[in-house]
Image (tube, rainbow, N blue to C red):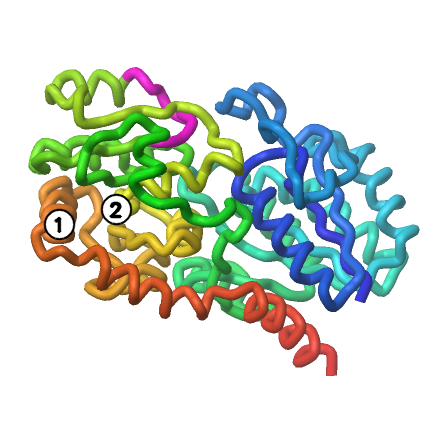
Amino acid sequence: MKIIIVGTAYPLRGGIAHFNALLAKHLGTHHEVETVTFKRQYPKLLFPGKTQDEAGTSNDTQEAPQLVDSINPLNWIKVAKILKDKKPDLLIFKYWLPFFGPCFGTIAKLVKRRTNAKVLFICDNIIPHERRLGDVIFTKYAFKQADYFIVQSDAVERDLQKYFPAVRYRKIPHPVYENFGDPIQKEVARTKLGINSKKVILYFGYVRAYKGLLVLIEAMRHLDDVLLLSVGEYYDDQTKYVDKVKSLGLESRIKFYPDYIPNDQVSLYFSAADVVVLPYLSATQSGITQIAYNFDKPVIATNVGGLAEVVIDGRTGFIVPPNNADALAKAINRFYSEKREQNFIDEVKIEKTKYSWENFIRAIEELMETHDK
């Protein structure tokens, strides 16, 4: 097949770009694959981060043509013509925010009008955690153009069936992120970061209210001799997190790294940690778990969305109720007091085999074959 992936891609940054790069790489072993990305992904008014571009260079990811303007309908027509002329068999869109519904839906509609192309949406969300006016309308417009869907958790599957009960889809777990290099020795990583603590936990990723970092900071009151690394750029008011730490007298036990972490530095933080903590208040799924598993790290997560489908309670980590600092602290203390790290690591190595890219690509191919007979 000739496949075109439309969406966030290098030189743009972030988890969606990483996913699309790996998707293109693995699809490319069996198919002809191209990727096109945004020249304007978000208007500056709507983007809370510092930059939308990847820091540094990518040694193994080719820079995608920057063609798409997310807010310019005339551009959508132009892009559709470019894609139509390539005569694709399949267009793939990674869907995570209804903001992109009009753009993706229009491009898909115009390409399908002049070609035999099919359209696949890989859905991180159907309706996002932080809902906005127009979410359902925009999503319905985009999904009307789709022939197939991939969902990656029970929570997203339920939303898809709720809003679009008759569509053709396959549920397949989010594969591991394998693009951040190999693990390094824990003590070496800690030395490079200037860490002397023997117990180190990691919060990684963008800081947004629904991700529950404030709850984890509160839980730190009940943890002895544990250092928290809070690693990620703030899409929320950083001041309230810093003030919370000061009010609890935890300045010496929480280290903030409030920037986006380039690919070649991600392994440093995961390698330095004993366990990764996801204190989310709500979620559908999280790519952070798949990064942790890539580095053979156990995870302590809250029971929201699809997190409990990936983190197997008592085997690859612990699952606790959301928005409960006491329960979170007890789980972290239990991890250390029961010396569960090595046992969890062994289980992670087994569990993560189901999250292979080979399985994911096969699911896409089987979905198309089944419904096109």
Is 224 left or right of 38, judged from the image as shown?
Answer: left
C-alpha separation, residue under disc 2 versus residue under disc 1:
9 Å
Asked whether residue 132 is in view, the answer is yes
Q: Whole-percent x and y of residue 79?
A: 82, 41
Residues 159 and 226: in front is: 226
Q: Is residue 115 magenta?
A: no
Inspect the image, locate mark 2, and give the three-letter code of the amino acid beneath it: Asp
If the image is split into quadrants, where does the C terminus sit? Answer: bottom right
Q: Earlier in the sequence, mark 2 or mark 1?
A: 2
Up the image or down, 292 lies above or below 65; here it is: below
| Residue 298, position as x, y percentages in the image | 29, 54
Q: Quick one: which residue is furthest to the bottom in this view?
A: 373
Residue type at the position of mark 1: Tyr
Crowdedness near tag 2: few (<14), some (14–19) or many (≥20) residues, C-alpha within 10 Å: many
Q: Which residues are magenta?
A: 231-239
Residue 78 position, x and y percent, is: 86, 38
Residue 221, image x, y percentages: 9, 32
SS at mark 2 in the image: loop
Look at 37% across and 65% down and name the residue there: 349
Residue labelled with disc 1: 336
Quarter location, residue 237: top left
Residue 235 colored in magenta in the image: yes
Q: Is residue 101 left or right of residue 212?
A: right
Residues at marks 2 and 1 touching, judged by CB atoms closer than 8 Å: yes
Query: Front-most of 331 and 138?
Result: 331
Q: Residue under label 2, please give it.
A: 274
The residue positioned 23% from the left and 59% from the top of the image is 342
